[in-house]
Amino acid sequence: MRFVKIDSPKSFFDKEKNILGQTVAVVRDAFASPMEFEDVYAHLTSPEKVYLVFEGKDVIGMGSYSERIFSGIPTLIVDGIAIRESFQGKGIFGGLTDLVLKGEKLICLRTQSPQMYRALEKKCRFVYPGKDVRIPEAIMAVLSEYGEFLNCVADESGVVRGFYGKSLYGKENAHHIVSPIFEKLDMNISAGDAMLVAGVR
């Protein structure tokens, strides 16, 4: 398995049509959904850092990241992660994120996926919002700035109601440990709710 950084993603994908096609297929497989080509293309070409995951010559995953300072804290933003379903749960997100991290104290992401939330838990000491712990003021400030970065506003629970307008997933995405957190926060995935998440390393 190889992690490959893609320099100048737009130029790369515009030139490498076969790899672009493979990557779009991976994203659709990961979400079990026929996602629009234009949406996938935008998520591949706009972030600061884009990586592909190869098994032999085949693309099996992608990750995109940005770096920001929120409330004075160096933060790594996970802009997008998609891993072919048959390779999920094998530590690819953790390995890829380790490769990208440059000492940031926070990792932020937006998600509808309990499995993605669980993957972040494995990388961090604390993750907010959580099941039993109120979000500290400092983390709420970070989530507020992250929301501004995404051009959205989260409620006091860290949830952006109707962010996507619908579920991005073609089938239920559940996790026995994390799904109760989503339920407690009254996440309505089918209506497009998304959670803004901050992990403290």
Image (cartoon, rainbow, N blue to C red):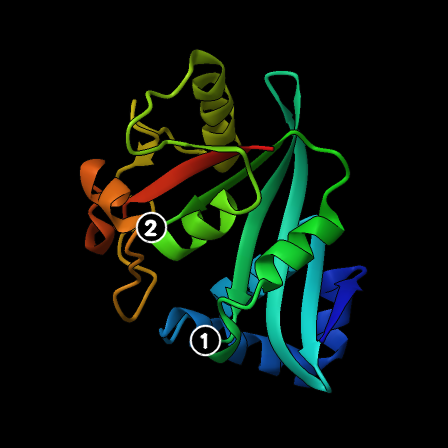
Q: Residue at x 60, y 64 (%)?
A: 92
The residue pinned by badge 2 equals 164
In the displayed structure, 198 sits above or below 47; it is: above
The residue positioned 27% from the left and 70% from the top of the image is 171
Circle 1 SS class? helix
Question: Which residue of the protein is positioned furthest toward the right in this rendering?
Answer: 7
**The quadrant where residue 2 appears:** bottom right
Q: Tell me where residue 3 appears, x and y as whole percent.
A: 74, 67
* First-in-chain label (2 vs 1): 1
Q: Where 193 sits versus 45, above or below?
A: above
Q: Is residue 2 left or right of residue 159?
A: right
Q: Is residue 187 left or right of residue 46?
A: left
In the picture shown, does residue 135 fall above or below 119? above
Q: Is residue 188 left or right of residue 201?
A: left
Residue 54 disc label: none
One can see residue 59 in this view: yes
Q: Secondary structure at mark 2?
A: loop
Towards the viewer: 164 or 54: 54
Q: Amino acid at mark 2?
A: Tyr
| Residues at marks 2 and 1, CA–CA distance in whole angstroms | 22 Å
Of badges 2 and 1, nearer the viewer stands 1
Classify residue 21 by image quadrant. Answer: bottom right
* Residue under numbered circle 1: 85
Rendered location of residue 42, percent (x, y): 56, 59
The quadrant in which the N terminus is found is bottom right
Q: Nearer the viewer, residue 78 or 16?
A: 78
Amino acid marked by disc 1: Glu
Residue at 32 percent of width and 36 percent of height? 160
- Local crowd at mark 1 within 10 Å, few (<14), some, or many (≥20)? some
